[in-house]
Image (tube, rainbow, N blue to C red):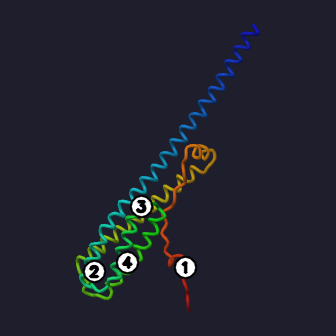
Amino acid sequence: MGGLALGGLVLIVLLVIGGLALLVVGWLILTYNGLVRLRNGVKNAWAQIDVQLRRRYDLIPNLVETVKGYAAHEKETFENVVKARQAGIDASNVKEQGQAENMITGALRQLFALSEAYPDLKANQNFLALQEELASTENKIGFARQYYNDSVQTFNTRQQMFPANMVAKMMGFEPRDFFELEEPEMREVPKVEF
């Protein structure tokens, strides 16, 4: 009778250990799949930004050509816009893309400042349509950037929290960079004078 009781006890212990092993394996699978889902969400969010950036890059040459018709002697401004656009196209990671977008924003500001000096350009229907299209694209980029950064925050938070951080480290999940634009004038404290 003692051997039968001992055999039953061993069977119960093996079932408990097997059940715990199944729970751990199930948790690992769920955690891994959750991290993959979040990582793919980040990739999708970046793809949405990329679509809008390409749209913007396609608009810039038309805008430059329109302005050239009125202010052909502003060669340096046109060259800055073209260089900034190319830097955006050539960017290979999120940080480089952010730097390139800062260049593009500054160059486009210079280009639009030219329109103030040329009233005929300011009234040109093609210029106005391109300006409106670019403004719409800028809004879409802003929304896509916000969605991307939200996705990055969720992904990074998930992979840094215990115990998922162990799975993330074992499986090679790396944190993603936020898509941040540096606009120095937005970081400066406004001067108030009375």
| Residue identifier under label 3 | 144
| Residue identifier under label 2 | 67
N-terminal-most mark, 3 or 1? 3
N-terminal-most mark, 4 or 3? 4
| Residue identifier under label 1 | 188
Cα distance, mark 2 to mark 4?
A: 14 Å
Q: Secondary structure at mark 1?
A: loop
194 over 17 or under it: above or below: below
Residue 84: image quadrant is bottom left
Do the residues bearing badges 3 and 2 touch, measured as CB atoms within 8 Å? Answer: no
Q: Secondary structure at mark 3?
A: helix
What amino acid type is highlighted by mark number 3? Ala
Cα distance, mark 3 to mark 1?
A: 25 Å
What amino acid type is highlighted by mark number 4? Asn
N-terminal-most mark, 2 or 4? 2
Residue 13: image quadrant is top right
